[in-house]
Image (cartoon, rainbow, N blue to C red):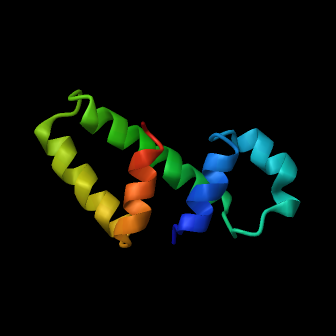
Amino acid sequence: MLTLAKIATYQLFGGDADGWSRERSSDRSGITDQDWRLIEELRHGIILVSSGQASPEFTVTFERRLAASVPDKKVRQAIRELTT
């Protein structure tokens, strides 16, 4: 499950998975490779939807996936803020 601490770690490394993997031993957020990938996938979906490039069907499906993957509204908002 994604948390604010995991989002903060992602943000600290600027989305650089290689940098994070080299420094992983000092990370205490508990973020995993799967979490990192999920954040990336959700960021890309948010960018597609917010830019108007996504179909209405994709938008509905994506918003459902986002809500199911990240039940905490504050965490969803933090992910959205990664795209600005």
Q: In the rendered view, tell whether residue 61 sits above or below residue 70.
A: above
Residue 33 in picture, x, y percent from top left: 66, 56
Q: In the rendered view, tell whether residue 60 sits above or below residue 50.
A: below
Residue 69 in picture, x, y percent from top left: 39, 65
Residue 42 lies left or right of residue 26; in this view the side is: left
Q: Residue at x 36, y 72 (%)?
A: 71
In the foreground, 37 or 3: 3
Tell me the quarter of the picture where residue 45 sits.
top left
Q: Residue at x 23, y 27 (%)?
A: 53
Residue 40 in picture, x, y percent from top left: 51, 45
Residue 11 in picture, x, y percent from top left: 61, 48
Q: Residue at x 54, y 66 (%)?
A: 4
Tell me the quarter of the picture where residue 35 sits.
bottom right
Name the quarter where the C terminus is drawn: top left
Could you tell me how many numbered marks the image carries? 0
Residue 70 lies left or right of residue 28; in this view the side is: left
Q: Residue at x 32, y 68 (%)?
A: 68
In the foreground, 72 or 66: 72
Pick out the residue farthest to the left. 56
